[in-house]
Image (cartoon, grey):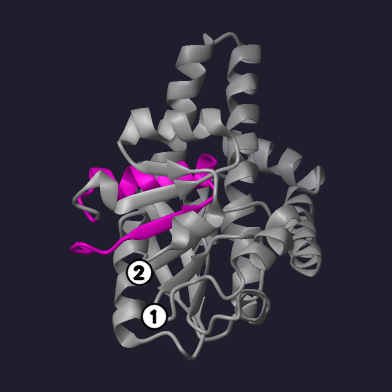
Amino acid sequence: MLEDLQIAFIGGGTMGEMIISRLLSTKIVPKADLIIVSDPVSARCLHLEREYGVRTTTSNIEAVLGVSIVILAVKPQILAEVLGMLKDKIPPNALVISIVSGASISSLCQGLNHPAVVRTMPNIAVQVGHGTTVWSASSSVTEIQRSHTQIILQALGKEFATQNEHYLDMATALSSAGTGFVFLYIEAMIDAGVQMGLTRTQAQELTLHTIAGSVELMFQTHEHPAVLRNKVTSPGGVTAAGLYELEKGGMRTVISNAVLAALSRTQQLGNIS
């Protein structure tokens, strides 16, 4: 639990709301009024007040007054404007945690004129407490602040700390964008099931349990996916026929290219911000 630390969210969009929900539902933040959210859309502020009981404002400067932790949850395209507005306004002893895609620690420190910055990249599964977040901290982040970061991120799922900030861009491409790739695969499997004659409900249940079971098997056995794949691929069998079509269609290359394209876009957004 973060005791009585005041937390400001700059940006009350989808990801910010997911994090707020998890912090309150897990009691990491014991009282809703310890959280203040700044968002330029009044309707969004009203929604967050009604849904979670948090305080809101349309002023970023007002939001950060006297807080211990500031969570930057804005789009990369408006980050420069936000940083300019908050420069020299963050309390000296506060921790800044950024979930802005592509924004480097150095650019955040310089833009805010503030030394204690943690850069993170969570994915959408934080909504159900199964997110994956890779994070890296500036040298000015204290041990207590690192501990606070871990407490927050562990409420969202699995967290991985790294000293090499370059891994954050890779994590964005593989873990954050990767959820979208997985959802597309799931959608394609369900559609195939419907095409064969299953109801959409049946196809979805079979697909989700198939994927969940496969993932759990890997977690428990620690075997290489190729080893497990070979166990279900009999010579001339059903799986072999399907795998042949996937390989012929270039599935490996397409997936690899998708991840690399996501990495390139992450780096572009970093340059924009």
Residue 217 image offset from top left, x and y in percent: 36, 51
Residue 149 image offset from top left, x and y in percent: 36, 70
Magenta residues? 1-28
Q: Crowding near pointer 1: few (<14 within 10 Å), some, many (20+)?
A: some
Q: Nearer the viewer, residue 168 or 254?
A: 168
Q: Is residue 241 left or right of residue 118?
A: right
Q: Secondary structure under badge 1?
A: loop
Q: Is residue 105 above or below residue 46?
A: below
Marks 1 and 2 in Cβ contact (< 8 Å): yes
Task: Identify the image quadrant of the C terminus.
Answer: bottom right
Q: State the image quarter where residue 65 is shown.
A: bottom left
Q: Which residue is mark 2?
A: 68
Disc sitting over residue 93 in the figure: 1
- Mark 1 vs 2, N-terminal side: 2
Q: Secondary structure under badge 2?
A: loop
Q: Is residue 235 visible?
A: no
